[in-house]
């Protein structure tokens, strides 16, 4: 789901969105580079086992007595097959096979590949609170396979009965387990229930399904997709395979209709599934239909029935994370509250991992939430049950209250909403929320690495956190162990590789990554804009017009933002100030000065004020954006007030040691240059180069419109080089020019005049 969500965030709806903008870990205690081996997972909470329940049953893997290779798959499949059939009796509870697998992992014999003893089987049953235990044997002679089930009373350890069934050929094995279930329970099945019908009669389809489940839980999506698709090819009516393939599509390509189609197929075909599986299928169909509230209610009900259901906990986390709906606060329809809680989401994913540390799907959204700076929402309109797609208007700043996240949504297109958002941003900065969340995310990533030390996703996640903490060298070391670039499920890792290359001065590698990503995503709607923006950062501007062409609005709006985009990255934008004035005047006339300032904030704060010659648009001097406040003072051309405002701005900017730059360095430098203070401008740019740049994500949106952090980097280093050269700081200037050239040297012809100017300046410095 990552790629799809990122693409939507960088789409045309970004036009008016106002998105808000470490500890040194050079080596581990043992002298090795991170991730540290000593930093294993936090100790699991050991909960006391529940009391034994005579109506709760557990099945442990059957033993392949003769160790015949072609039935070895039945060892673990026996648990799933018996569970699915026994679950059709409504007056008992059967522990699901995934929970059994988690419990079995702690059995010494199972870890060594040996047969599970009766003593270990009883211990597992007691941990699950099961009063009845089923163990068994598999014996193949010729084409016939004998299945033997042994039923034990857990409290006494006594065997209650032994049941045998025989499958005459491989195609009859699934049916044999259905008959075995009836004998194990020693009671007739519920009226109208068919045994041996787990949703498929094809052994091949069932084997592919089991393999896919193993891959999916370890987040090997390509392999899982292949296996579930194969299961459906062998049996198109296999409801559980459709359900699991829908889950895969949810992560791989959520914007395509395929996931929704398979979820609907699972719902249509799953009418004979056991109650638990039917609930999973029904809940996920609601999830794919964006009926997140309905989905959460279903999964909450499952957890009430079984608090150890890993998949129910995981799905509750999913629907809680993705639920965008905001509801009016009772008694005050101008204020909102999220229908779902991200604290519920975090608790659900953590509970799933507590129950099963190998359920790797549950790690990702813990990371996503803790690395986010805002949460988007949308209103449910009257007489509608679903939430519309987010447009960026309803947002909340992520703050903290102790161990909990606080997300209060506002309509940021209103003056009040924008002010409250700015207030919450300030509170989050003062409370060092970003740092706290990053450190918490790092601990979660270390747990993930400990659970899957050889897999690429946890390494990529860990590298991203190190990068956000400003530990670029360490992030580079870790991400190189994560495997090759991938542009589908691993687009975040590709973006991080690009950012690391730039920050380590390897412009050629950054350019190669940007070109590759642009080529790979150019025809993919959900990720296309990411490739366009990264290419723009390295001077490849061909795709940028498509961003502004997608704007839905009058020509006046399109023209302003087309020129704004050029100006923001540091190119000449003729008639920009005229376009700015026309748009500002139009918005002032309909929505007021505060709103006009928000809409045109990119040019207000990032156009060099020395070029304005007094041509300022209407400015909101009461804005809570410190960059706008500074420019509002500079606009009145009072040098005394300007220097006081710059001193306040500098003081605030320097205190943001843990925060991304958010364009503050460029704004401060332009302000100092307006009052002819080259030293002050250099101080701001040096602080960016040495501190804030390293923890500034390239795709952070710094103001409304198409204004992303990385787009400022070339012009920032070019200005640093010019100012350092003017003050005789030759080495510093040369280093800055090289950094600039590393980004734009091989850019389009349009950027080459600036490239040539930097090369000539570098030559004069002897570089």
Image: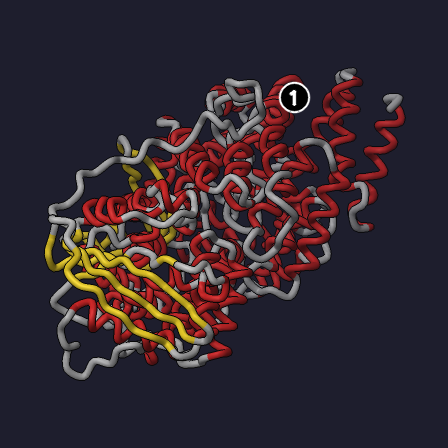
Left or right of 418: which side holds 570? Answer: right
Camera-side residue of 441 and 329: 441
| Disc 1 secondary structure class | helix
The image position of residue 620, as x and y in percent, is: 43, 40
- Residue hosting label 1: 682
Question: On the image, which quarter does residue 405 sit in?
Answer: top left
Camera-side residue of 30 and 512: 30
Which residue sits at x=44%, y=62%?
73
Q: Dot 1, how many residues are within 10 Å of its Cα: few (below 14), some (14-19), or many (20+)?
A: many
Which residue sits at x=43%, y=54%?
217
Image height check: is 262 above or below 528? below
The image position of residue 656, as x and y in percent, is: 47, 25
Left or right of 608: which side holds 619? Answer: left
Which residue sits at x=48%, y=68%?
208
Which residue sits at x=74%, y=41%?
509
The image position of residue 667, as x and y in percent, is: 57, 32
For the image, the number of numbered tags is 1
Q: Look at the image and tell me whether residue 634 can be seen.
A: no
The quadrant in which the C terminus is found is top right
């Amino acid at each position: 789901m990552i790629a799809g969500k990122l693409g939507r965030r960088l789409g045309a709806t970004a036009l008016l969105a106002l998105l808000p903008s470490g500890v040194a870990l050079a080596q581990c205690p043992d002298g090795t580079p991170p991730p540290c081996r000593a930093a294993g997972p936090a100790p699991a909470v050991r909960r006391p086992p529940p009391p034994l329940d005579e109506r709760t049953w557990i099945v442990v893997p059957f033993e392949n007595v003769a160790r015949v290779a072609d039935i070895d798959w039945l060892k673990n499949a026996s648990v799933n097959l018996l569970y699915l059939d026994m679950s059709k009796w409504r007056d008992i509870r059967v522990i699901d096979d995934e929970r059994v697998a988690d419990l079995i992992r702690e059995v010494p014999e199972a870890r060594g590949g040996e047969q599970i003893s009766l003593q270990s089987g009883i211990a597992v049953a007691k941990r699950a609170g099961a009063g009845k235990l089923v163990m068994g044997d598999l014996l193949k002679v010729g084409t016939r396979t004998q299945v033997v089930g042994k039923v034990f009373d857990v409290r006494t350890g006594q065997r209650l009965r032994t049941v045998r069934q025989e499958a005459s050929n491989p195609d009859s094995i699934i049916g044999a387990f259905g008959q075995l279930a009836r004998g194990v329970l020693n009671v007739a099945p519920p009226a109208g229930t068919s045994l041996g019908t787990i949703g498929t009669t094809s052994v091949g389809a069932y084997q592919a399904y089991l393999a896919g489940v193993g891959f999916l839980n370890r987040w090997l999506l390509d392999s899982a997709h292949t296996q579930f698709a194969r299961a459906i090819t062998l049996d198109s009516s296999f409801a559980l395979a459709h359900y699991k393939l829908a889950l895969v599509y949810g992560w791989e390509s959520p914007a395509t209709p395929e996931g929704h189609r398979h979820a609907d197929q699972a719902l249509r075909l799953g009418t004979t599934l056991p109650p638990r599986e039917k609930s999973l299928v029904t809940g996920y169909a609601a999830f794919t239909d964006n009926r997140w509230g309905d989905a959460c209610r279903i999964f909450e009900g499952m957890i009430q029935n079984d608090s150890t259901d890993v998949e129910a906990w995981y799905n509750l986390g999913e629907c809680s994370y993705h639920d965008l709906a905001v509801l009016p606060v009772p008694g005050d329809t101008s204020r909102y509250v999220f229908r779902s809680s991200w604290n519920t989401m975090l608790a659900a994913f953590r509970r799933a991992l507590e129950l099963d540390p190998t359920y790797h799907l549950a790690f990702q959204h813990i990371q996503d939430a803790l690395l986010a700076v805002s949460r988007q929402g949308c209103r449910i309109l009257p007489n509608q049950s679903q939430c519309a797609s987010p447009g960026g208007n309803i947002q909340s700043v992520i703050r903290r209250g102790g161990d909990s996240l606080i997300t209060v949504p506002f309509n940021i297109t209103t003056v009040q909403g924008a002010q409250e958002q700015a207030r919450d941003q300030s509170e989050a900065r003062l409370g060092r929320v970003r740092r706290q969340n990053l450190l918490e995310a790092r601990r979660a990533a270390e747990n993930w690495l400990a659970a899957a030390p050889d897999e690429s996703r946890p390494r990529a996640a860990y590298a991203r956190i190190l990068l956000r903490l400003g530990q670029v060298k360490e992030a580079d070391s870790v991400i190189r162990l994560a495997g090759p670039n991938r542009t589908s499920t691993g687009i975040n890792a590709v973006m991080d590789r690009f950012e690391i290359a730039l920050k380590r001065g390897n412009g050629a590698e950054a350019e190669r990554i940007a070109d590759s990503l642009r080529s790979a995503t150019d025809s993919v709607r959900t990720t296309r804009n990411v490739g366009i923006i990264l290419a723009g950062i390295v001077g490849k501007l061909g795709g940028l017009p498509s961003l502004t062409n997608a704007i839905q609005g009058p020509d006046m709006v399109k023209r302003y933002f087309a020129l704004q985009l050029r100006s923001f990255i540091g190119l000449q934008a003729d008639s920009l100030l005229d376009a700015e004035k026309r748009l500002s005047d139009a918005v002032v006339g309909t929505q007021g000065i505060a709103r006009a300032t928000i809409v045109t904030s990119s040019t207000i704060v990032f156009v060099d004020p020395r070029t304005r010659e007094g041509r300022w648009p209407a400015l909101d001097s009461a804005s809570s954006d410190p960059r706008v406040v500074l420019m509002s003072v500079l606009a009145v051309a009072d040098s005394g007030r300007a220097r006081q405002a710059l001193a306040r701005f500098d003081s605030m900017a320097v205190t943001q040691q843990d925060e991304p730059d958010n364009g503050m360095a460029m704004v401060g430098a332009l302000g100092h240059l307006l009052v002819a203070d080259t030293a002050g401008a250099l101080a701001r740019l040096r602080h960016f180069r040495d501190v804030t740049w390293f923890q500034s994500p390239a795709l952070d949106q710094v103001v409304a419109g198409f204004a992303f952090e990385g787009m400022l980097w070339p012009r920032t280093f070019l200005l640093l080089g010019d100012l350092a050269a003017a003050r005789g700081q030759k080495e510093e200037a040369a280093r800055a020019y090289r950094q600039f050239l590393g980004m734009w040297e091989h850019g389009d012809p349009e950027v080459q005049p600036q490239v040539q100017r930097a090369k000539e300046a570098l030559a004069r410095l002897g570089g």
